[in-house]
Amino acid sequence: MDHQIRSDMIEEDIVIVGAGVAGLATALGLHRMGLKSMVLESWENLRVTGFAFGTFTNAWKALDALGIGDTLREQHILLQGSVATSMISGIWSPLISFSNPRPNMPQGHEVRCVGRTVLLETLANELPHGTIRFCSKVVSIEEQGYFKLIHSTDGSIVKTKVLIGCDGVNSMVAKWLRLQDPLSAGRTATRGHVVFKESEGHSFDPRFLQFFGDGCRAGLLPLNKSTVYWFFTQATSTLRSADKEIEEIKQYIVKKLGKAPKQVIDIIEETDNESIASSPLRFRSPVNILFGNISKENVCVAGDALHPMTPDIAQGGNAALEDGVTLARCLSRALLRNAPNEKEGYNNIKEGLDKYAKERRWRSFELITTAYIVGVIQEGRGTVSKFIRDKLWSPYLAGIVLSRAEFDCGKLDT
């Protein structure tokens, strides 16, 4: 059947696959620039994985560019600094202040732990009604001249000038671009959060607490006065030996925390099983980032569809926000440029997406590579790794993390 005469075909200038951080940030950036988009989400509502994430200065610059930074600041406390502790000896390192001036950051860093649900809802609430189309799982992508036809499981077809894949680690759009499948990091991350009654709250100071042991790492961050987020990462095979049941995984984590403060251990034990999620860690090969297709013709990827990475420098969600601002800027310039015919418009789009890919390629390479190396050292079991981590690493860890957060993705209209 000729797709051009199908009555059930929907036509949209821009289609974004995936209503996660990157997808909604891109949609909002385009909306701020006066461009309409359709976001296709496979779930029946906003999907949240991971509960929360550390949001650093680079992310706040992106959030401010999107016009929602202050709204989120009101709901999340400013973290003062980072403290690292050995799970084996119980020895604490001195507080590394986030507010200390740095060569490229004379005002210091802004660091908060932001709830994913709050972030996604804030992004979605700023979009025009009907932008997100739920229960729309993409099953195939077809080419038709200068357009792409997107087929969903419900039988619908969307015809679009631009296709943006923000559909996560198992991205259908990344497969269409022939990017390689993400690699296993050989590690598992378990994440959880506890919400206290507002009248009671928690007793944690506004600090990022990190814990290192023999082959594992944990962390705890308060979001506000009533919510605390925690994580634990370790070799997959080791964690699975404790069983896949959440309750047993939780008890295993408590045991591994060793000489961590009782206050921290209590948080793990008090976490409801429904508030804990465990998943294997994956990352895209840095070589594939350098030489693969981030964009091709009028198609590109962003967020985890572009740069899945391990969480060791807390930049996955931050980078997704950078992607959204950069992509909205590059694409809006292309689409707002006068195009006398479809071919010229297509070439403008390709040029805009090529510029986006050029801006994000090396940044993605840097973040994925740094995160992987940091993870190897943090959770290393060998004598050399232990020496580097215990004797040399802690004082420099915060510096490495903060240096990657000094990036500025720019404004939407610069």
Image (cartoon, rainbow, N blue to C red):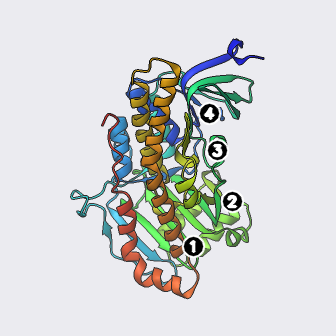
Residue at image point 45% right, 17% down: 340
Tags 4 and 1 in contact by the CB under 8 Å rule? no
Give the number of the mark in front: 2 or 4.
4
Give the number of the mark in front: 2 or 3.
3
Q: Residues within 10 Å of mark 1 (few under 14, many from 20)?
A: many
Tags 3 and 4 in contact by the CB under 8 Å rule? no
Instruction: Residue 89 in the image: state x and y as whole percent.
Output: 48, 84
Give the residue at mark 1: 216
Looking at marks 3 and 1 on the same chain, the residue that comes earlier in the sequence is marked by 3
Measure the C-alpha gap from mark 2 to mark 1.
18 Å
Looking at marks 4 and 1 on the same chain, the residue that comes earlier in the sequence is marked by 4
Give the residue at mark 3: 171
Q: Is residue 6 left or right of residue 397?
A: right
Give the number of the mark in front: 2 or 1.
1
Give the residue at mark 2: 246
Q: Residues within 10 Å of mark 2 (few under 14, many from 20)?
A: some
Instruction: Residue 172 in the image: state x and y as whole percent.
Output: 67, 41
Q: Nearer the viewer, residue 69 or 92?
A: 69
Q: Is residue 230 left or right of residue 110?
A: right
Residue at image point 41% right, 36% down: 330
Q: Secondary structure at mark 2?
A: helix
Give the residue at mark 4: 41
Kind of residue sitting beneath label 1? Cys
Asked whether residue 88 appears in the rendered view, the answer is yes
Q: Secondary structure at mark 3?
A: loop
Looking at marks 3 and 4 on the same chain, the residue that comes earlier in the sequence is marked by 4
